[in-house]
């Protein structure tokens, strides 16, 4: 009889919820995790948006000009469809700007500092390098882009 | 993880309530047990656990060894953050307004009993990246007669990553490791980079082929939680990004690595240092004989 068959074990794996909740870290010390979570959520929103976008834009081919104009008119003012569109645009602005940061960091290994000997106060080089500033810039730029899109859609 | 100096030096609340997540392997029961511990200034979580074990509950199980953040055995989750129990102060986690601390076994590991986790999978993954120097000159590797040359600049490229103590905190905090069993994890990937960046190693292509597989390196999405929780500032997140950059170049056939040569030891190669010009040799005095002779005044008396 093996140990595993005699005794029970507990699988403490967090599963998918770790991709959507900041478990294991505090967001104040690890904004990269917040960017990671937002990138995942916005990615899922964009998948839904692309599907809806393809269906709505081929209205012209399916039903003609009048139906197409009716489709576009849905985005005027505040209604459920334009609200979903605003959410999708927010997701798009964050996902695209954060994507540029990720390409620089993940493919070209830029903005993550140089390896160095640990010294007080023991901050890892990658968490104090330019990519940390790039994250804050990403949040601000995405917010500005989103506000601009909402302004153009609803007020302009 | 950066240390909050103000928090670690202040006095903790007099009594702190410890909520310990426990698991009984015989019945499979999981429960939170509460212990009230009297604290003192400078008390660590490990000290508190040892106090619980010796004074309150002898059945509480946890793993520890060195008590000074060197062995990496006492990794636990404290208030939702993976930490080394011996390096976390009670004062850092418990405040006067909320004198409570939650202690759990490490996330993403299999729990054997109470706070003890199974590291078999962790070490298997570490083994997969071949964590040792591989050379073509087998004879020299097994029975070295000479040395491998390496400059301080070359050493600094991987020194940071060689400080890993294999405590498993990075894997416990990784959101990708939590959901993907095939993912090698930050620890193994950081070690893979450590050996690829080492100029003494020649089998980088072998490792890169292994890391190029689905589920290895490309699953990392730079949440950087591993670097944030690492107690030894190993920075696995940066290592994985560098590794991926190397893989990108390797796939384009642009990656070139400098491999160090075998050289004689420094002491054989170097010429003896000449005496300074002001030094004069006294005739009829042999230094070797002087060393053999007993001193006129015994050493014991000199010390007195």
Image (tube, grey):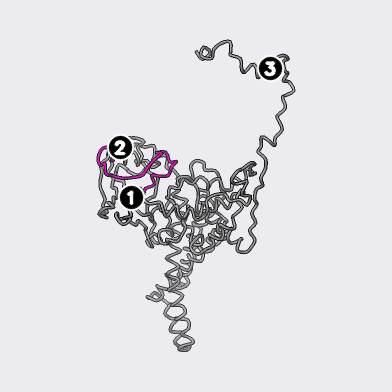
Judge whether A139 appears above or below B79 on screen. Answer: below
Give the answer, above or below, for where B251 lies relative to A125.
below
Q: Are marks 2 and 3 on the same chain?
A: yes
Find the distance from the CA under tag 3 to the CA under tag 1: 69 Å
What subunit carries mark 3? Answer: B
Q: How many marks?
A: 3
Q: At numbered mark 3, what does the secondary structure look like: helix, strand or loop?
A: loop
Spot the residue most to the right: B277
Q: Residue at x 72, y 27 (%)?
A: B274
Point out the frontmost of discs 3 and 1.
Answer: 3
Judging by the rendered image, the residue that carries numbered circle 3 is B286
Look at the numbered disc 1 and give the secondary structure of its residue: strand
Q: Looking at the picture, tell me which residue is in the foreground, A150 or B111.
A: B111
Location of residue B73 in the rendering, given as x and y in whole percent from the top left corner = 40, 44
What range of the chain is rendered magenta? B52-76
Percent x, y for residue B211? Answer: 53, 59
Output the chain of dot 1: B
What residue is shown with label 2? B39
Drawn side of residue B268 relative to residue B214, left or right: right
Along the polypeptide, which appears first: circle 3 or circle 1?
1
The N terminus of chain A appears in which quarter of the rendering?
bottom left
Horizontal side of residue A100 vs B10, given as left or right: right
- Does residue A131 belong to the magenta stretch? no
Question: Real-space Cα distance between discs 1 and 2?
Answer: 20 Å
Q: Please name the residue shown 29% across and 50% down the image.
A: B21
Q: Looking at the image, is mark 1 or mark 2 earlier in the sequence?
A: 2
Q: Give the overall secondary structure of the magenta segment.
A: loop
Q: Is residue B98 visible?
A: no
Residue matched to label 1: B104
Residue B60, magenta (yes or no):
yes
């Amino acid at each position: 009889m093996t140990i595993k068959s005699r005794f029970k074990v507990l699988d403490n794996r967090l599963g998918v919820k770790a991709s959507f909740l900041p478990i294991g870290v505090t967001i104040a010390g690890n904004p990269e995790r917040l960017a990671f979570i937002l990138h995942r959520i916005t990615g899922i929103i964009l998948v839904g948006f692309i599907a809806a976008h393809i269906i709505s834009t081929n209205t012209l081919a399916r039903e003609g000009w009048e139906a197409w104009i009716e489709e576009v008119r849905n985005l005027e003012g505040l209604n459920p469809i334009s609200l979903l569109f605003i959410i999708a645009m927010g997701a798009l602005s964050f996902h695209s700007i954060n994507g540029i940061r990720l390409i620089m960091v993940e493919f070209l290994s830029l903005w993550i500092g140089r390896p160095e000997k640990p010294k007080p106060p023991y901050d890892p080089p990658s968490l104090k390098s330019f990519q940390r500033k790039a994250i804050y810039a990403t949040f601000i730029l995405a917010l500005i882009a989103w506000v601009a899109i909402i302004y153009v859609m609803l007020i302009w | 993880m950066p240390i909050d100096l103000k928090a670690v030096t202040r006095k903790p609340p007099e009594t702190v309530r410890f909520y310990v997540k426990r698991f009984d392997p015989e019945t499979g029961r999981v429960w939170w047990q509460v212990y009230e511990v009297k604290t003192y200034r400078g008390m660590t979580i490990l000290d508190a656990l040892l106090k619980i074990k010796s004074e309150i509950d002898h059945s509480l199980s946890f793993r520890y060894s060195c008590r000074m953040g060197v062995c990496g055995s006492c990794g636990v989750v404290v208030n939702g953050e993976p930490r080394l129990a011996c390096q976390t102060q009670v004062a850092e986690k418990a405040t006067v307004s909320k004198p409570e601390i939650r202690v759990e076994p490490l996330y993403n590991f299999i729990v054997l009993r109470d706070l003890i986790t199974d590291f078999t999978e962790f070490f298997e993954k570490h083994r997969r990246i071949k964590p040792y120097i591989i050379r073509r000159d087998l004879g020299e590797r097994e029975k070295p007669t000479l040395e491998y040359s390496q400059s301080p600049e070359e050493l600094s490229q991987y020194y940071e990553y060689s400080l890993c103590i294999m405590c498993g905190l990075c894997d416990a905090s990784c959101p990708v490791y939590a959901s993907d069993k095939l993912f090698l994890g930050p620890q193994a990937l950081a070690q893979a980079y450590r050996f690829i960046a080492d100029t003494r190693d020649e089998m980088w292509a072998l490792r890169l082929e292994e890391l190029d597989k689905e589920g290895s390196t490309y699953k990392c999405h730079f949440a950087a939680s591993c670097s944030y929780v690492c107690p030894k500032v190993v920075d696995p997140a940066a290592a994985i990004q560098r590794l991926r950059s190397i893989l990108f170049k390797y796939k384009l056939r642009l990656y070139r690595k400098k491999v160090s040569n075998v050289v004689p030891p420094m002491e054989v190669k170097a010429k003896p240092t000449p005496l300074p010009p002001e030094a004069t040799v006294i005739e009829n005095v042999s230094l070797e004989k002087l060393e053999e002779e007993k001193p006129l005044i015994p050493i014991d008396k000199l010390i007195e």
